[in-house]
Image (tube, rainbow, N blue to C red):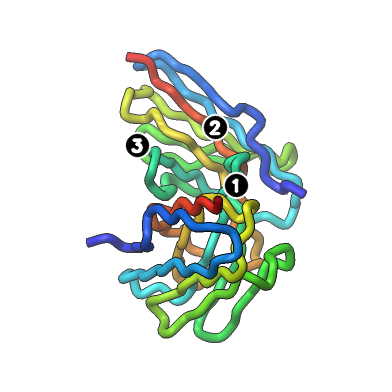
Amino acid sequence: DTAVSQTPKYLVTQMGNDKSIKCEQNLGHDTMYWYKQDSKKFLKIMFSYNNKELIINETVPNRFSPKSPDKAHLNLHINSLELGDSAVYFCASSQNGVSPLHFGNGTRLTVT
Amino acid sequence: DQQVKQNSPSLSVQEGRISILNCDYTNSMFDYFLWYKKYPAEGPTFLISISSIKDKNEDGRFTVFLNKSAKHLSLHIVPSQPGDSAVYFCAASSPTGNQFYFGTGTSLTVIP
């Protein structure tokens, strides 16, 4: 049983396209996150979301938008993809926003 | 502005010896610190944590030390095993925030 699963694992697309990455957690956690790992291996938070509040990292372009259909899912939509969006995107979840994060296995996005 | 720093990108250690991974932080409000381990093509997995009210936490072969005055923490692995070869990330959070700040990781290689 995978605790945090995200799909697809690899995503190759062209500039200007719109794409989505899906994330689901079966841990019953109330907070979910999206992290971006860039070419320098720096893990940087993009969003955190619980059923009450969406917190957006101010450096994230508004082409990125999280969508949460329910507590167990937090999908990431990206519009008008750019070359600089190429990275590994990790979904994560935690209980109460302070317990250790549980990560998915990442989605490697390549924009050509 | 990187609030958590791991200045050693890589470390090689002989099997059976001690591995010491270091981490520095700048935000004095951080009160909870974690270490994550990451294998290639997988997400980071939680390893061990420490609260700022402690200066040491031990779990089997893994011990984390916290020096608040120096804003420094370290992870000791004794004895090191080949299966410990992975990238180790240090992370920190504050009581007011709803996110974890990560370092850029240290790649540990344990040589058999």
Which mark is drawn over residue B106?
A: 2
Nearer to us of marks 3 and 2 is: 2
- A5 lies left or right of B87: left
Q: Residue A59: name its quadrant.
A: bottom right
Find residue B31 and report its horizontal and vertical position in percent: 64, 55
Which residue appears at 40% of the width and 25% of the height? B78
Q: Classify B106 as above or below A62.
A: above
Q: Earlier in the sequence, mark 3 or mark 2?
A: 3
Which mark is drawn over residue A38?
A: 1
The answer for how far apart the CA atoms under marks 2 and 1 are is 15 Å
Find residue A67 and report its horizontal and vertical position in percent: 50, 79
Secondary structure under the numbered disc 2 in the rendered image: strand
Which residue appears at 64% of the width and 74% of the height? A55
Residue furthest left as drawn: A1
> Which class describes the residues within 10 Å of circle 1: few (<14), some (14-19), or many (20+)?
some
Marked residue chain, label 3: B
Mark 3 sits on what residue?
B60
Q: Are marks 3 and 2 in contact (CB under 8 Å)?
A: no
Q: Are marks 2 and 1 in contact (CB under 8 Å)?
A: no
Give the tally of numbered discs.
Answer: 3
Which amino acid type is marked by label 3? Gly
Q: Quadrant of the C terminus of chain B?
A: top left
